[in-house]
Image (cartoon, rainbow, N blue to C red):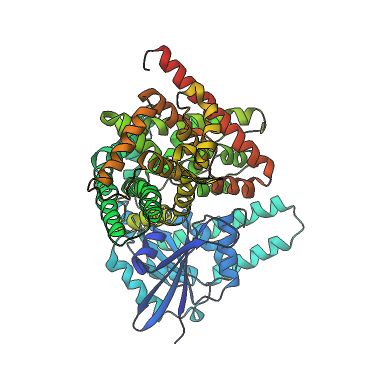
Amino acid sequence: MSTLAVALTGNPNTGKSTIFNELTGARQKIGNWPGVTVDKKVGYTRYKDRAISIVDLPGTYSVNARSPEEKIVIDYLMNNKLDLVMDVVDSSNIERNLFLTVQLLEQGIPLLIDLNMQDDAARRGIKIDVKKLEEAIGMPVVETVGRSSKSTKKLLDVFTSTVMSQYHVSPQVQEHIDKVQAIKAGSQSESDKEEAIIEARYALIDKIMAQAVDMGNVGQSKSEKIDHFLANGFLALPIFLLILYAVFQITFTWIGQPIADFLDDAINTDFVDFMTDFLTDAGVADWMVSLVCDGIISGVGAVLTFVPLIFVLFFCLSFLDGTGYMARIAFIMDPIMRRCGLTGKGVMPLMMGFGCGVPAIMGARALDSEKDRMVSILVTPFLTCGAKLPIMALFAAMFFPDNAANVVFAMYIIGMVMAIVVAKGLGSTIFKDKGSTFLLELPPYRVPDMKTVLLETWDKGKGYLIKAGTIIFAASVLLWVMSNYNFSGPAEIEDSILATVGSWMSHLFVFQGFDTWEAGAAVLSGIMAKETVVATIGILYGAGDVSTEAEDAADTATTMMQTGMATAFTSLSAFAFMVFSQLYTPCVTALGTIKKEAGGWKWVAFSALYMFAIAWFVSLLVYQIGRLLGFE
């Protein structure tokens, strides 16, 4: 028996992805649609010995093919053989959601209509007569509560028992489709045609609503009441900053850091000690012991130590997104973003930048104007991505142990402020243009579905693990070779290739207080991947003679890193180094993405140079002003 092919479509925030996660669980493959950066989610399940393939299409309000999401949805539905297309409708906002339903029916796509979030609709006093709705549209209708596993699992029985060829649109829907075809074939201008079609759609929706939906006495919703407090014009920004601050306390003080400390002891003490003894007892050559322990384990291990921080941060952000609060941030930031010549919608790629700069740069495609898109691409790398987080966490824990969370929080704020300031500058000079309109729907507040939150956390965090096992592994080996050899052969680290290159680089940072060759080498390695800054520091300051049989070899290496960094940096120069690392040239992967999205090498060169210059100047100000104030 062939696999049953199902596609899920619907507006954003209708619970579509929650249903997808409930049905498929961990049996998912997540990638990108060909040629675009929008997530492609395909899941699999079985029911009554029937294999079912489910595709979670991007949420969209329309299928006019004006955005990547809209184009993906209509192209996939029109060009693939599907057994079922389920249109997930938010029952509490059914009138608005039916606009997409009508558009899909116009394209001749048979639909299984899922009235999701029935619990929200019931609380608002909205009553939907399922049989009358089926008669009004001509398509089968089911009801679900997306966060209820029992409710969602019933869909599998519907999928395997529904034969869409038995259904046909109702006479009134067919009449509407014929009317739309006539409008398209008319002699009106395109704008007049579009306006007439939209009017016809709403006329049909009004008929359907009158036939099947009782709105009752819909008063102010719970979400609207909450927004009076959280999205209040005066309190909104302070509340947002307090919430963000709480996220960093959870990550760096209460949960993430204690787990990271435990992992640090396990990797950099217990595991290094075990591998040193094991390789030495096995008679492995000294250089191989050094490569494995000083290079690979010190490099990759230094990065893996921060995995708990990454996952805790991503969990917090996914949790906030699940509550519906993240969408409010765009509205909260809109007045500030408008002063930069952008709209609140421009803050969304910036928020994505807290995870990784690459998808954040790609996310600028969703912005409405070319100006907004280009400005967003060029300022997003200022944000503290997951790759910069280990740098901040390492230096904060070592030089500001009593205020680590506050210092890291300050780095995030510095990145956000710099992105906004530079956006203003770019928007007023290179990309001077008219302002853009801003339209974004606010989803209702709800308790997040934990399965969805956990799956999103894993999806975002696993990229960090993959990078640690590939790019960071390769970089650690390369850095070990460069730190143990020069062009004449094996060499002490002070005479190595890395020391020579780092020394050249260090001359740039005389006025920032970190003009050592080790810091120069770390900065240079960070252009390859920001995580390698920590890997480089781990190798350079943690390098010890671990080939000996000393029982305390691992402890000695860790102590050397701590004392070495303490000698090379003061608290003020460490803070200046953090600021520089926060703001300077993006990694090569981000630069490649800028080339692809901005459409030219000139923007790669511009981004690399102007960000380096800004980072150099701001870190200079931090260090020199700090000295004048007596912090040195």
Q: Quadrant of the N terminus?
A: bottom left
Q: Is residue 277 left or right of residue 455?
A: left
Q: Quadrant of the C terminus?
A: top left
Q: Quadrant of residue 212?
A: bottom left
- Is residue 553 visible to us here? yes
Residue 70's place in the image compared with 631, above or below, is below
Query: In percent of the image, x 36 and y 17: which residue is there?
Result: 631
Query: In percent of the image, x 70 and y 50: which residue is there?
Result: 191
Percent from the top left, x then y, of residue 278? 28, 59
Residue 145's place in the image compared with 313, above or below, is below
Residue 176's place in the image compared with 2, above or below, is above
Residue 34's place in the image compared with 588, above or below, is below
Percent from the top left, x then y, of residue 470? 46, 56
Foreground pick, 629 / 10: 629
Foreground pick, 600 / 337: 600
Q: Residue furthest bottom?
A: 1
Q: Quadrant of residue 531?
A: top left
Query: In percent of the image, x 39 and y 70: which residue is there?
Result: 131
Percent from the top left, x then y, of residue 260? 28, 45
Foreground pick, 33 / 346: 33
Q: Is residue 255 left or right of residue 583?
A: left
Q: Residue furthest right?
A: 187
